[in-house]
Amino acid sequence: MLAQTGVLPSVNVGSCGPGSGRVMLAHTAMASAFSLRPSPPRGRRPGPRSSLTTSASMRSGLSIQGHQPTSPAGWAIIVDSLRRADVQLLSPQEVQHALQAGTQCVVDVRLPAEFEAGHVSGTVNVPFFRPISGWDAVRVLRRLAFALFGIRTGTELNPLFVEEVSRVAADSSKGIILMCNIGGVIEHSGSFKVGTQSRSLTAAHVLVESGKFGSIKVLKGGVNGWAASERPIEEM
């Protein structure tokens, strides 16, 4: 199983497709109250949407219409938006075919250290989370919260996530496939009536709400499922 780790705040962002290189993007300094609210597409009235934020009121850095994404209310909103947008979960075989055909931009949303430890060939790393940066009061408390659980390097949302995905998926004719470690599900699963949450599904929700992307899919089972199906994993 591939576990989450923390690293320096750099991002492995290239472009989708064969031969895509590794480009290091330096993040500019972010104010503690940074928020990202995409403009609604023409013809649509703005309403309550998800936003990336690092305000003190949102401990996780992500507001789902005023709810924490891990709360029952927040997760229910995420599932509803993914279903309405017809976000599909693909098998490892389907993702492998998409990579071979070059018809999809496949984005690994895990931390750079996780990506370097083992990733699917042909994918581009755009982390949904990043190591905590800055030492304002909110981030100090966030670091302490992680430390209480024995995690030395805590994480926060990457406020440039949508922008970076837009950069690597510049070809709008291609769909986007997201992957994390576990993939998650949005249908009834055992004792979970509304599926199981994951980074890739939450990231898919943020992309859906941005209104900038068309077809969005997620690798079912994530990188762990890919490896369990005896498909190759690359290391850096």
Image (cartoon, rainbow, N blue to C red):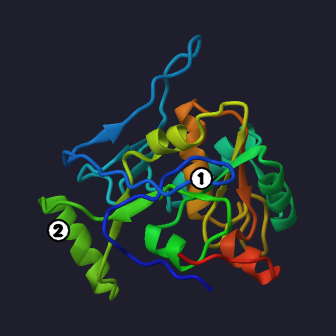
Q: As rendered, which of 236 and 73 lies closer to the eye?
A: 236
Q: As rendered, which of 135 and 46 lies closer to the eye?
A: 135
Image quadrant where residue 163 sits = top left
Mark 2 or 1: in front is 1
Image point 13% across, 63% down: which residue? 135
Q: Position of residue 161 (x, y in %)?
A: 45, 47
Q: Position of residue 181 (x, y in %)?
A: 61, 72
Q: Is residue 201 above or below residue 39?
A: below
Q: Position of residue 69 (x, y in %)?
A: 49, 56
Classify residue 219 as left or right of residue 25: right
How far apart are the alpha carbons under marks 2 and 1? 37 Å
Q: Amino acid at mark 2?
A: Val
Q: Circle 2: is it few (<14), some (14-19), or many (20+) Cα within 10 Å? A: few
Q: Which mark is residue 190?
A: none
Report the quarter where the N terminus lies.
bottom right
Q: Which mark is residue 140?
A: 2
Q: How many marks?
A: 2
Image point 73% across, 80% down: which residue? 227
According to the image, label 1 marks what residue?
20
